Image (cartoon, rainbow, N blue to C red):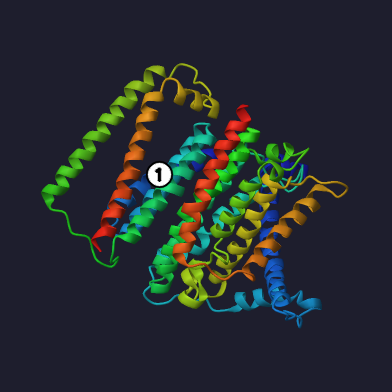
Protein backbone atom coordinates (compact mmCIF):
# COMPACT_ATOMS: atom_id res chain seq x y z
CA UNK A 1 0.00 0.00 0.00
CA UNK A 2 2.81 2.39 0.94
CA UNK A 3 4.51 1.78 -2.38
CA UNK A 4 1.39 2.40 -4.41
CA UNK A 5 0.82 5.50 -2.34
CA UNK A 6 4.28 6.82 -3.08
CA UNK A 7 3.96 5.95 -6.74
CA UNK A 8 0.85 7.97 -7.50
CA UNK A 9 1.00 10.28 -4.50
CA UNK A 10 -1.26 10.39 -1.47
CA UNK A 11 -3.02 13.45 -2.79
CA UNK A 12 -4.26 11.49 -5.81
CA UNK A 13 -5.43 8.62 -3.61
CA UNK A 14 -7.24 11.05 -1.32
CA UNK A 15 -8.88 12.70 -4.31
CA UNK A 16 -10.05 9.38 -5.78
CA UNK A 17 -11.42 8.17 -2.43
CA UNK A 18 -13.16 11.53 -2.04
CA UNK A 19 -14.74 11.32 -5.49
CA UNK A 20 -15.95 7.75 -4.98
CA UNK A 21 -17.37 8.77 -1.61
CA UNK A 22 -19.14 11.74 -3.21
CA UNK A 23 -20.65 9.54 -5.95
CA UNK A 24 -21.83 7.01 -3.39
CA UNK A 25 -23.36 9.79 -1.31
CA UNK A 26 -25.13 11.29 -4.37
CA UNK A 27 -26.79 7.97 -5.20
CA UNK A 28 -27.62 7.13 -1.58
CA UNK A 29 -29.04 10.62 -0.99
CA UNK A 30 -31.27 10.36 -4.07
CA UNK A 31 -32.55 6.94 -3.00
CA UNK A 32 -33.39 8.20 0.48
CA UNK A 33 -35.00 11.37 -0.81
CA UNK A 34 -37.25 9.66 -3.38
CA UNK A 35 -38.48 7.36 -0.63
CA UNK A 36 -38.87 10.27 1.81
CA UNK A 37 -40.69 12.40 -0.72
CA UNK A 38 -43.25 9.71 -1.41
CA UNK A 39 -43.71 9.02 2.29
CA UNK A 40 -44.04 12.74 3.13
CA UNK A 41 -46.46 13.24 0.25
CA UNK A 42 -48.45 10.22 1.36
CA UNK A 43 -48.79 11.25 4.97
CA UNK A 44 -49.63 14.84 4.08
CA UNK A 45 -52.49 13.57 1.94
CA UNK A 46 -53.62 11.06 4.59
CA UNK A 47 -52.25 8.10 2.66
CA UNK A 48 -49.44 5.76 3.75
CA UNK A 49 -47.15 5.97 0.76
CA UNK A 50 -45.02 3.04 -0.45
CA UNK A 51 -45.19 0.06 1.91
CA UNK A 52 -44.99 -3.17 -0.09
CA UNK A 53 -41.27 -3.48 -0.94
CA UNK A 54 -39.28 -3.98 2.25
CA UNK A 55 -40.12 -2.64 5.75
CA UNK A 56 -41.95 0.72 5.44
CA UNK A 57 -41.33 0.48 1.69
CA UNK A 58 -37.63 1.26 2.26
CA UNK A 59 -36.44 -0.87 -0.65
CA UNK A 60 -38.90 0.75 -3.06
CA UNK A 61 -36.33 3.27 -4.48
CA UNK A 62 -33.91 0.40 -5.24
CA UNK A 63 -36.65 -1.38 -7.15
CA UNK A 64 -37.36 1.86 -9.02
CA UNK A 65 -33.66 2.34 -9.80
CA UNK A 66 -33.39 -1.21 -11.16
CA UNK A 67 -36.44 -0.61 -13.31
CA UNK A 68 -34.90 2.57 -14.74
CA UNK A 69 -31.55 0.87 -15.36
CA UNK A 70 -33.23 -1.98 -17.17
CA UNK A 71 -35.19 0.24 -19.55
CA UNK A 72 -34.18 0.74 -23.14
CA UNK A 73 -32.53 4.10 -23.74
CA UNK A 74 -34.64 5.63 -26.47
CA UNK A 75 -33.40 8.37 -28.77
CA UNK A 76 -36.34 9.99 -30.56
CA UNK A 77 -35.99 10.75 -34.26
CA UNK A 78 -35.27 14.39 -35.08
CA UNK A 79 -33.37 15.30 -31.90
CA UNK A 80 -30.24 17.42 -32.11
CA UNK A 81 -27.95 14.54 -31.16
CA UNK A 82 -24.87 16.23 -29.59
CA UNK A 83 -27.00 18.52 -27.41
CA UNK A 84 -29.43 15.72 -26.54
CA UNK A 85 -26.66 13.36 -25.44
CA UNK A 86 -24.57 15.96 -23.60
CA UNK A 87 -27.35 17.55 -21.53
CA UNK A 88 -27.80 14.78 -18.90
CA UNK A 89 -24.03 14.53 -18.46
CA UNK A 90 -23.48 18.27 -18.05
CA UNK A 91 -26.20 18.60 -15.41
CA UNK A 92 -24.01 16.39 -13.22
CA UNK A 93 -20.88 18.59 -13.31
CA UNK A 94 -22.10 21.30 -10.89
CA UNK A 95 -23.49 18.61 -8.57
CA UNK A 96 -20.13 16.86 -8.24
CA UNK A 97 -18.11 20.08 -8.01
CA UNK A 98 -20.30 21.41 -5.19
CA UNK A 99 -19.55 18.41 -2.99
CA UNK A 100 -15.81 19.10 -3.13
CA UNK A 101 -16.09 22.22 -0.99
CA UNK A 102 -19.00 21.48 1.37
CA UNK A 103 -17.66 20.86 4.90
CA UNK A 104 -19.56 17.87 6.28
CA UNK A 105 -17.67 18.07 9.56
CA UNK A 106 -14.54 19.76 10.91
CA UNK A 107 -12.32 17.18 9.22
CA UNK A 108 -14.59 15.71 6.55
CA UNK A 109 -14.19 17.93 3.53
CA UNK A 110 -12.59 16.98 0.21
CA UNK A 111 -10.86 20.35 -0.15
CA UNK A 112 -11.00 23.66 1.70
CA UNK A 113 -10.65 26.17 -1.15
CA UNK A 114 -10.45 29.82 -0.12
CA UNK A 115 -13.05 30.73 -2.77
CA UNK A 116 -15.30 27.81 -1.79
CA UNK A 117 -18.76 29.36 -2.10
CA UNK A 118 -17.80 30.96 -5.43
CA UNK A 119 -16.99 27.51 -6.80
CA UNK A 120 -20.51 26.28 -6.00
CA UNK A 121 -22.25 29.41 -7.29
CA UNK A 122 -20.15 29.61 -10.45
CA UNK A 123 -20.68 26.01 -11.47
CA UNK A 124 -24.36 25.99 -10.55
CA UNK A 125 -25.01 28.16 -13.61
CA UNK A 126 -24.05 25.17 -15.78
CA UNK A 127 -27.27 23.42 -14.89
CA UNK A 128 -29.21 26.16 -16.72
CA UNK A 129 -27.23 25.38 -19.85
CA UNK A 130 -27.91 21.71 -19.42
CA UNK A 131 -31.64 22.43 -19.23
CA UNK A 132 -31.37 24.70 -22.26
CA UNK A 133 -29.51 21.99 -24.21
CA UNK A 134 -32.07 19.38 -23.20
CA UNK A 135 -34.95 21.65 -24.16
CA UNK A 136 -33.49 22.73 -27.47
CA UNK A 137 -32.03 19.36 -28.39
CA UNK A 138 -35.25 17.43 -27.73
CA UNK A 139 -36.97 19.09 -30.69
CA UNK A 140 -40.18 19.25 -28.70
CA UNK A 141 -42.27 22.34 -27.97
CA UNK A 142 -42.98 21.42 -24.35
CA UNK A 143 -39.31 20.84 -23.69
CA UNK A 144 -38.37 24.15 -25.29
CA UNK A 145 -40.98 26.12 -23.35
CA UNK A 146 -39.70 24.48 -20.16
CA UNK A 147 -36.15 25.50 -21.01
CA UNK A 148 -37.13 29.12 -21.74
CA UNK A 149 -38.99 29.35 -18.44
CA UNK A 150 -36.03 27.87 -16.63
CA UNK A 151 -33.68 30.55 -17.98
CA UNK A 152 -35.99 33.43 -17.07
CA UNK A 153 -36.44 31.95 -13.61
CA UNK A 154 -32.73 31.41 -13.11
CA UNK A 155 -31.82 35.00 -14.08
CA UNK A 156 -34.44 36.36 -11.70
CA UNK A 157 -33.56 34.25 -8.67
CA UNK A 158 -29.79 34.12 -8.90
CA UNK A 159 -29.52 37.82 -7.95
CA UNK A 160 -31.36 37.69 -4.58
CA UNK A 161 -29.58 34.41 -3.79
CA UNK A 162 -26.14 35.98 -4.32
CA UNK A 163 -27.08 39.16 -2.45
CA UNK A 164 -28.36 37.19 0.54
CA UNK A 165 -25.13 35.18 0.74
CA UNK A 166 -23.07 38.33 0.19
CA UNK A 167 -24.27 39.85 3.45
CA UNK A 168 -22.85 36.82 5.30
CA UNK A 169 -19.62 37.01 3.31
CA UNK A 170 -19.31 40.68 4.32
CA UNK A 171 -19.70 39.70 7.98
CA UNK A 172 -17.03 36.99 7.87
CA UNK A 173 -14.69 38.52 5.27
CA UNK A 174 -14.21 35.09 3.72
CA UNK A 175 -15.42 32.91 0.86
CA UNK A 176 -14.22 29.74 2.57
CA UNK A 177 -17.11 27.63 3.82
CA UNK A 178 -15.08 26.34 6.74
CA UNK A 179 -14.21 29.83 7.97
CA UNK A 180 -17.89 30.78 7.74
CA UNK A 181 -18.87 27.78 9.87
CA UNK A 182 -16.13 28.52 12.40
CA UNK A 183 -17.35 32.14 12.65
CA UNK A 184 -20.68 30.82 13.99
CA UNK A 185 -19.17 29.34 17.16
CA UNK A 186 -21.21 31.68 19.36
CA UNK A 187 -24.43 32.53 17.58
CA UNK A 188 -25.77 31.21 14.31
CA UNK A 189 -25.95 33.78 11.52
CA UNK A 190 -29.68 33.18 11.15
CA UNK A 191 -30.05 35.23 14.33
CA UNK A 192 -28.18 38.20 12.85
CA UNK A 193 -29.58 37.80 9.34
CA UNK A 194 -33.10 36.34 9.47
CA UNK A 195 -34.15 38.30 6.36
CA UNK A 196 -31.17 37.08 4.35
CA UNK A 197 -31.97 33.51 5.38
CA UNK A 198 -35.57 33.82 4.19
CA UNK A 199 -34.53 35.43 0.90
CA UNK A 200 -31.88 32.76 0.34
CA UNK A 201 -34.30 29.95 1.09
CA UNK A 202 -37.03 31.21 -1.24
CA UNK A 203 -34.50 31.83 -4.02
CA UNK A 204 -32.94 28.41 -3.45
CA UNK A 205 -36.30 26.64 -3.79
CA UNK A 206 -36.79 28.54 -7.05
CA UNK A 207 -33.29 27.72 -8.30
CA UNK A 208 -33.83 23.99 -7.79
CA UNK A 209 -37.12 24.21 -9.77
CA UNK A 210 -39.18 22.79 -6.92
CA UNK A 211 -42.87 23.45 -6.36
CA UNK A 212 -44.25 26.16 -5.89
CA UNK A 213 -41.68 27.38 -8.44
CA UNK A 214 -41.55 24.30 -10.69
CA UNK A 215 -42.68 26.03 -13.88
CA UNK A 216 -39.89 24.53 -16.05
CA UNK A 217 -41.44 21.09 -15.54
CA UNK A 218 -45.05 21.94 -14.71
CA UNK A 219 -46.74 18.57 -15.28
CA UNK A 220 -50.21 19.94 -15.89
CA UNK A 221 -49.07 22.27 -18.67
CA UNK A 222 -45.83 20.93 -20.14
CA UNK A 223 -46.01 17.12 -19.80
CA UNK A 224 -42.63 16.94 -18.02
CA UNK A 225 -40.94 20.12 -19.24
CA UNK A 226 -37.36 19.92 -20.41
CA UNK A 227 -36.99 16.16 -19.82
CA UNK A 228 -40.12 15.12 -21.69
CA UNK A 229 -38.14 13.24 -24.34
CA UNK A 230 -35.71 11.51 -21.99
CA UNK A 231 -36.20 7.95 -20.85
CA UNK A 232 -34.39 5.25 -18.88
CA UNK A 233 -31.04 6.14 -17.35
CA UNK A 234 -30.85 9.56 -19.04
CA UNK A 235 -34.04 10.57 -17.26
CA UNK A 236 -32.63 9.07 -14.07
CA UNK A 237 -29.61 11.38 -14.32
CA UNK A 238 -31.87 14.46 -14.39
CA UNK A 239 -33.75 13.00 -11.47
CA UNK A 240 -30.57 12.33 -9.46
CA UNK A 241 -29.32 15.84 -10.17
CA UNK A 242 -32.56 17.40 -8.98
CA UNK A 243 -32.53 15.58 -5.66
CA UNK A 244 -28.84 16.24 -5.13
CA UNK A 245 -29.42 19.93 -5.83
CA UNK A 246 -32.13 20.00 -3.18
CA UNK A 247 -29.60 18.60 -0.72
CA UNK A 248 -26.87 21.02 -1.84
CA UNK A 249 -28.98 24.18 -1.39
CA UNK A 250 -30.01 22.91 2.06
CA UNK A 251 -26.38 22.18 2.91
CA UNK A 252 -25.35 25.71 1.88
CA UNK A 253 -28.18 27.16 3.97
CA UNK A 254 -26.97 25.12 6.95
CA UNK A 255 -23.36 26.19 6.38
CA UNK A 256 -24.17 29.87 6.01
CA UNK A 257 -26.99 30.39 8.47
CA UNK A 258 -27.46 27.41 10.80
CA UNK A 259 -23.98 26.86 12.19
CA UNK A 260 -22.90 24.10 9.82
CA UNK A 261 -21.51 21.06 11.58
CA UNK A 262 -21.49 22.71 15.00
CA UNK A 263 -23.68 21.48 17.81
CA UNK A 264 -23.43 19.97 21.29
CA UNK A 265 -22.83 16.28 22.21
CA UNK A 266 -23.22 14.61 18.81
CA UNK A 267 -20.34 14.50 16.27
CA UNK A 268 -20.24 17.19 13.56
CA UNK A 269 -21.35 15.06 10.65
CA UNK A 270 -24.53 14.01 12.48
CA UNK A 271 -25.47 17.61 13.21
CA UNK A 272 -24.72 18.62 9.64
CA UNK A 273 -26.87 15.89 8.09
CA UNK A 274 -29.62 16.41 10.67
CA UNK A 275 -29.91 20.13 9.91
CA UNK A 276 -29.61 19.63 6.16
CA UNK A 277 -32.30 16.96 5.98
CA UNK A 278 -34.55 19.07 8.19
CA UNK A 279 -34.37 21.81 5.55
CA UNK A 280 -34.91 19.22 2.81
CA UNK A 281 -38.04 18.18 4.67
CA UNK A 282 -39.18 21.83 4.75
CA UNK A 283 -38.72 22.01 0.96
CA UNK A 284 -40.86 18.86 0.54
CA UNK A 285 -43.39 20.28 2.96
CA UNK A 286 -43.63 23.41 0.78
CA UNK A 287 -44.23 21.25 -2.27
CA UNK A 288 -47.28 19.59 -0.78
CA UNK A 289 -48.62 22.77 0.83
CA UNK A 290 -48.56 25.51 -1.81
CA UNK A 291 -49.97 25.44 -5.34
CA UNK A 292 -47.75 26.44 -8.27
CA UNK A 293 -47.41 30.19 -8.80
CA UNK A 294 -48.25 31.82 -12.12
CA UNK A 295 -45.32 32.86 -14.29
CA UNK A 296 -45.82 36.62 -13.92
CA UNK A 297 -46.21 36.14 -10.16
CA UNK A 298 -42.97 34.16 -10.12
CA UNK A 299 -41.00 36.97 -11.79
CA UNK A 300 -42.72 39.69 -9.76
CA UNK A 301 -41.83 38.02 -6.45
CA UNK A 302 -38.18 38.12 -7.38
CA UNK A 303 -37.80 41.47 -9.13
CA UNK A 304 -40.22 43.52 -7.04
CA UNK A 305 -39.87 41.97 -3.59
CA UNK A 306 -36.80 39.78 -3.08
CA UNK A 307 -34.19 41.86 -4.93
CA UNK A 308 -35.06 45.24 -3.31
CA UNK A 309 -35.25 43.58 0.10
CA UNK A 310 -31.91 41.86 -0.44
CA UNK A 311 -30.30 45.17 -1.47
CA UNK A 312 -31.68 46.96 1.60
CA UNK A 313 -30.49 44.08 3.78
CA UNK A 314 -27.01 44.32 2.23
CA UNK A 315 -26.86 48.11 2.73
CA UNK A 316 -27.96 47.84 6.35
CA UNK A 317 -25.44 45.06 6.99
CA UNK A 318 -22.65 47.14 5.46
CA UNK A 319 -23.69 50.19 7.50
CA UNK A 320 -23.87 48.27 10.78
CA UNK A 321 -20.50 46.62 10.16
CA UNK A 322 -18.86 50.06 9.76
CA UNK A 323 -20.38 51.42 13.00
CA UNK B 1 4.47 15.38 -19.76
CA UNK B 2 2.77 15.45 -16.37
CA UNK B 3 -0.92 15.73 -15.52
CA UNK B 4 -0.82 19.50 -15.07
CA UNK B 5 0.57 20.08 -18.55
CA UNK B 6 -2.01 17.76 -20.11
CA UNK B 7 -4.85 19.64 -18.41
CA UNK B 8 -3.24 22.91 -19.50
CA UNK B 9 -3.27 21.72 -23.11
CA UNK B 10 -6.91 20.63 -22.80
CA UNK B 11 -7.76 24.08 -21.44
CA UNK B 12 -6.09 25.79 -24.40
CA UNK B 13 -7.81 23.48 -26.89
CA UNK B 14 -11.17 24.15 -25.19
CA UNK B 15 -10.59 27.91 -25.33
CA UNK B 16 -9.60 27.99 -29.01
CA UNK B 17 -12.05 25.28 -30.07
CA UNK B 18 -14.93 27.02 -28.34
CA UNK B 19 -14.03 30.30 -30.00
CA UNK B 20 -13.87 28.61 -33.41
CA UNK B 21 -17.24 26.98 -32.77
CA UNK B 22 -18.77 30.31 -31.76
CA UNK B 23 -17.60 31.93 -35.00
CA UNK B 24 -17.98 29.11 -37.51
CA UNK B 25 -21.10 27.23 -36.44
CA UNK B 26 -24.26 28.03 -38.36
CA UNK B 27 -26.64 27.43 -35.46
CA UNK B 28 -27.03 30.16 -32.88
CA UNK B 29 -27.37 27.66 -30.03
CA UNK B 30 -24.09 25.98 -30.95
CA UNK B 31 -22.43 29.39 -31.24
CA UNK B 32 -23.55 30.18 -27.70
CA UNK B 33 -22.30 26.82 -26.42
CA UNK B 34 -18.95 27.60 -28.07
CA UNK B 35 -18.85 30.91 -26.23
CA UNK B 36 -19.54 29.14 -22.93
CA UNK B 37 -16.74 26.65 -23.63
CA UNK B 38 -14.32 29.51 -24.33
CA UNK B 39 -15.29 31.27 -21.10
CA UNK B 40 -14.60 28.06 -19.18
CA UNK B 41 -11.25 27.73 -20.95
CA UNK B 42 -10.27 31.28 -20.00
CA UNK B 43 -11.32 30.57 -16.41
CA UNK B 44 -9.02 27.52 -16.52
CA UNK B 45 -6.14 29.69 -17.73
CA UNK B 46 -6.68 32.01 -14.75
CA UNK B 47 -6.25 28.99 -12.48
CA UNK B 48 -2.89 28.37 -14.12
CA UNK B 49 -2.02 32.05 -13.51
CA UNK B 50 -2.49 31.23 -9.83
CA UNK B 51 -5.65 33.27 -9.36
CA UNK B 52 -8.65 31.10 -8.46
CA UNK B 53 -10.72 34.16 -7.44
CA UNK B 54 -10.57 35.72 -10.92
CA UNK B 55 -11.22 32.31 -12.42
CA UNK B 56 -14.40 31.78 -10.43
CA UNK B 57 -15.51 35.35 -11.15
CA UNK B 58 -14.97 34.69 -14.85
CA UNK B 59 -17.33 31.70 -14.70
CA UNK B 60 -19.83 33.43 -12.41
CA UNK B 61 -20.08 36.56 -14.55
CA UNK B 62 -19.45 35.41 -18.11
CA UNK B 63 -21.06 31.96 -17.95
CA UNK B 64 -23.59 32.47 -15.17
CA UNK B 65 -24.78 35.95 -16.10
CA UNK B 66 -23.69 37.13 -19.56
CA UNK B 67 -24.16 33.85 -21.42
CA UNK B 68 -27.44 33.12 -19.65
CA UNK B 69 -28.63 36.59 -20.70
CA UNK B 70 -27.55 35.87 -24.28
CA UNK B 71 -29.49 32.60 -24.11
CA UNK B 72 -32.50 34.54 -22.84
CA UNK B 73 -32.18 37.01 -25.71
CA UNK B 74 -31.95 34.13 -28.20
CA UNK B 75 -35.18 32.72 -26.81
CA UNK B 76 -36.90 36.08 -27.29
CA UNK B 77 -35.98 36.70 -30.94
CA UNK B 78 -38.88 34.85 -32.45
CA UNK B 79 -39.11 31.75 -34.65
CA UNK B 80 -35.99 29.74 -33.88
CA UNK B 81 -36.23 27.47 -36.91
CA UNK B 82 -35.83 30.38 -39.33
CA UNK B 83 -32.32 30.63 -40.81
CA UNK B 84 -30.64 34.03 -40.36
CA UNK B 85 -30.06 36.17 -43.44
CA UNK B 86 -26.77 35.37 -45.17
CA UNK B 87 -24.16 38.11 -45.15
CA UNK B 88 -22.91 39.51 -48.43
CA UNK B 89 -19.28 38.92 -49.33
CA UNK B 90 -18.43 42.61 -48.88
CA UNK B 91 -20.16 42.60 -45.53
CA UNK B 92 -18.19 39.56 -44.40
CA UNK B 93 -14.95 41.17 -45.56
CA UNK B 94 -15.59 44.44 -43.75
CA UNK B 95 -16.60 42.64 -40.55
CA UNK B 96 -13.53 40.37 -40.67
CA UNK B 97 -11.25 43.35 -41.28
CA UNK B 98 -12.77 45.27 -38.39
CA UNK B 99 -12.43 42.41 -35.94
CA UNK B 100 -8.89 41.61 -37.13
CA UNK B 101 -7.72 45.22 -36.73
CA UNK B 102 -9.18 45.57 -33.24
CA UNK B 103 -7.71 42.23 -32.13
CA UNK B 104 -4.31 43.14 -33.60
CA UNK B 105 -4.37 46.48 -31.78
CA UNK B 106 -5.28 44.77 -28.50
CA UNK B 107 -2.64 42.10 -28.98
CA UNK B 108 0.14 44.57 -29.77
CA UNK B 109 -0.84 46.78 -26.84
CA UNK B 110 -0.89 43.73 -24.58
CA UNK B 111 2.52 42.51 -25.70
CA UNK B 112 4.06 45.97 -25.36
CA UNK B 113 2.53 46.44 -21.92
CA UNK B 114 3.29 43.03 -20.52
CA UNK B 115 6.68 41.90 -21.71
CA UNK B 116 8.87 44.76 -20.44
CA UNK B 117 7.43 44.00 -17.01
CA UNK B 118 7.66 40.25 -17.31
CA UNK B 119 11.00 40.08 -15.47
CA UNK B 120 9.66 41.79 -12.38
CA UNK B 121 8.25 39.67 -9.61
CA UNK B 122 4.48 39.69 -10.01
CA UNK B 123 2.41 41.01 -7.14
CA UNK B 124 -0.29 38.90 -5.52
CA UNK B 125 -3.73 39.93 -6.76
CA UNK B 126 -6.08 39.59 -3.82
CA UNK B 127 -9.70 40.71 -3.49
CA UNK B 128 -8.46 43.43 -1.15
CA UNK B 129 -6.01 44.68 -3.77
CA UNK B 130 -8.67 44.66 -6.50
CA UNK B 131 -11.08 46.56 -4.24
CA UNK B 132 -8.38 49.11 -3.34
CA UNK B 133 -7.58 49.67 -7.04
CA UNK B 134 -11.25 50.24 -7.83
CA UNK B 135 -11.51 53.01 -5.26
CA UNK B 136 -8.12 54.64 -5.91
CA UNK B 137 -6.42 54.51 -9.31
CA UNK B 138 -9.29 53.11 -11.33
CA UNK B 139 -12.11 55.09 -9.73
CA UNK B 140 -12.90 57.09 -12.89
CA UNK B 141 -13.25 54.09 -15.30
CA UNK B 142 -15.18 52.25 -12.58
CA UNK B 143 -17.67 55.11 -12.20
CA UNK B 144 -17.93 55.53 -15.98
CA UNK B 145 -18.79 51.84 -16.36
CA UNK B 146 -21.47 52.12 -13.68
CA UNK B 147 -22.86 55.16 -15.54
CA UNK B 148 -22.93 53.10 -18.73
CA UNK B 149 -24.79 50.31 -16.97
CA UNK B 150 -27.34 52.79 -15.56
CA UNK B 151 -27.90 54.25 -19.03
CA UNK B 152 -28.33 50.75 -20.46
CA UNK B 153 -30.90 49.86 -17.76
CA UNK B 154 -32.81 53.11 -18.37
CA UNK B 155 -32.76 52.41 -22.11
CA UNK B 156 -34.12 48.91 -21.55
CA UNK B 157 -36.93 50.28 -19.36
CA UNK B 158 -37.79 52.92 -21.98
CA UNK B 159 -37.88 50.28 -24.75
CA UNK B 160 -40.12 48.05 -22.67
CA UNK B 161 -42.48 50.94 -21.85
CA UNK B 162 -42.69 52.13 -25.48
CA UNK B 163 -43.47 48.69 -26.85
CA UNK B 164 -46.18 48.32 -24.23
CA UNK B 165 -47.75 51.63 -25.31
CA UNK B 166 -47.97 50.54 -28.95
CA UNK B 167 -50.21 47.61 -28.21
Q: Horizontal and vertical percent for residue A136?
A: 39, 66
What residue does disc 1 label?
A: B15
Give the residue drawn at x 51%, y 26%: B125
Residue lying furthest left: B90
| B9 left or right of B90 in image | right
Q: Horizontal and vertical percent for residue B95?
A: 19, 44
Q: Horizontal and vertical percent for residue B27?
A: 30, 60
Give the residue drawn at x 31%, y 54%: B160
**B145 or A115: which is nearer to us?**
B145
| A168 left or right of B17 in image | right
Residue lying furthest bottom: A52
Give the residue drawn at x 30%, y 56%: B25
- Work out which quarter of the rendered image holds the C terminus of chain A and state it: top right
Q: Horizontal and vertical percent for residue A293?
A: 52, 67
Give the residue drawn at x 60%, y 58%: A245
Q: Is residue B142 above or below residue A145?
A: above
Check disc 1 and report its element: helix, strand or loop. helix
**Callout 1 crowding tier (Cα within 10 Å): few <14, some 14–19, many ≥20:** many
Query: The numbered mark 1 sits on a residue in which chain?
Result: B
**B13 or A75: which is nearer to us?**
A75
Q: Is residue A15 above or below residue B112?
A: below
Amino acid sequence: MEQIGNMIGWETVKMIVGLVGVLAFVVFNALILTWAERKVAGHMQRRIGPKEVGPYGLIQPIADALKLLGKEILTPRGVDKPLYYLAPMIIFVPVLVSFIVIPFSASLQVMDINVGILVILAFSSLSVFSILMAGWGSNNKYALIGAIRSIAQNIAYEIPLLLALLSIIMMTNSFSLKTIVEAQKGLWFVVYQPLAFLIYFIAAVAETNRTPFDLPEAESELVAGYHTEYSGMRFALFFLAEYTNVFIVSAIAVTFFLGGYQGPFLPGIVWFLLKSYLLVFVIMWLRWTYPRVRFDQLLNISWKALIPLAFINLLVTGGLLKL
Amino acid sequence: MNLGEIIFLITIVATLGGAAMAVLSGSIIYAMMGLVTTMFGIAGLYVYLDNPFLSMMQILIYVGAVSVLIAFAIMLIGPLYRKPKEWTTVGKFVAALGVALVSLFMFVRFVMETFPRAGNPSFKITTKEIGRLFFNNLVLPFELISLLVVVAILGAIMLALFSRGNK
